[in-house]
Image: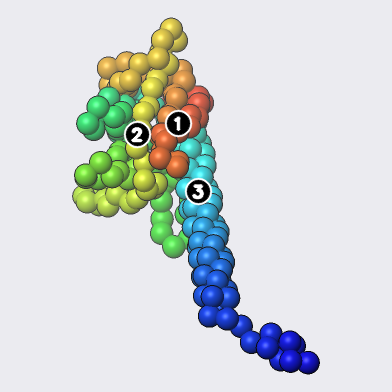
Amino acid sequence: MSAIFRNKGFTLLEILIAVVLLGILSAALYGSYFGVLRARERASSGMESRRELGATLDLLRREVSSAIFNRSDKRLRFVVEDRDNFGVPSSTLEMTTLAPPAGDSRSESGIVVVTYRMAGKNKRFTLTRQERDLFSEESVIPAYPQMEQINAFLVECYDGSKWIKSWDTAINGALPKGVRVTVQIEEEGKPVQFTVLSTPRVTAQ
């Protein structure tokens, strides 16, 4: 009985060891919890970036496919300018294309002039999109962000024999036979490129 009585308590060393073990376990659980939170945030951000990228490339593919040109109407045009920012491709694309009506809220012709270009500073760029109705009398049309956190935007045109980085229907006299759009973004610190091909199908000579 006396031996059992003597062993009922904990020594100071045992308590210190327990506290240290509890601290180590808490730190591990704390790190794991916030590691999971950070991974979930990265996954969510990546999914949103991919969704935005997919929507942008699909929109570009459809608009290029519906691009229109007529030599007798100078308002109808397809222009690609080869530019760069700090050595990174930064094309400018302007085209006249068919667009579905936005609704009954305003009258529109269904023919729009769309301009894509990169804008930004300090090596942080956004792909902007500007749209106006061909017959609109508005003098100032705002450009809206189409895709954020973009590293490069390259538009190439196929003339039937090779891919070139510049095009102007006023000079070439026709729409390109094919258009290749390449967008570069950054994923987990690495540059990743995505490309879409499209062929203009509406041509009125």
| Circle 2 residue | 152
The residue at which mark 1 appears reads as 193
Query: Is label 3 in a helix, a strand or a loop?
Result: helix
Q: Is residue 28 visible?
A: yes
> From the viewer's perspective, is 94 left or right of 60?
left
Residue extending farthest to the right is 1
Q: Position of residue 77 (x, y in %)?
A: 33, 29
Check whether the beta carbons of the residues at disc 2 and disc 3 lie within 8 A of each other.
no
Residues at marks 3 and 1, CA–CA distance in whole angstroms: 14 Å
- Secondary structure of the residue carrying tag 1 is strand
Which quadrant of the figure contains the N terminus?
Answer: bottom right
Residue under pointer 3: 46
As displayed, is residue 172 above or below residue 122? Answer: above
The spot of residue 157 in percent (x, y) is: 39, 20
Picture layout, residue 38 above or below residue 197: below
Q: Is residue 100 visible?
A: no
Q: Count neighbours of disc 3 (C-alpha within 10 A) and say few if under 14, some if 14 to 19, many if 20 or more.
A: some
Along the horizontal axis of the image, is 107 left or right of 167? Answer: right
Residue type highlighted by circle 3: Gly
Between marks 1 and 2, how big is the CA–CA gap? 9 Å
Category of crowding for the residue at label 2, using alpha-carbon neighbours closer than 10 angstroms: few (below 14), some (14–19), many (at least 20): many
Residue sitting at 34 percent across and 37 percent down? 151
- Kindly state the secondary structure of the residue where label 2 is placed: strand
Residue closest to the eye, 25 or 187: 25
Measuring from the top left, give residue 194's x and y in whole percent: 48, 32
- Residue at 57% x, 81% y: name it: 11
CB of mark 1 within 8 Å of CB of mark 2? yes
Q: Which mark is residue 143?
A: none
Mark 2 to mark 3: distance in Å? 18 Å
Tell me which amino acid carries mark 2.
Answer: Ala
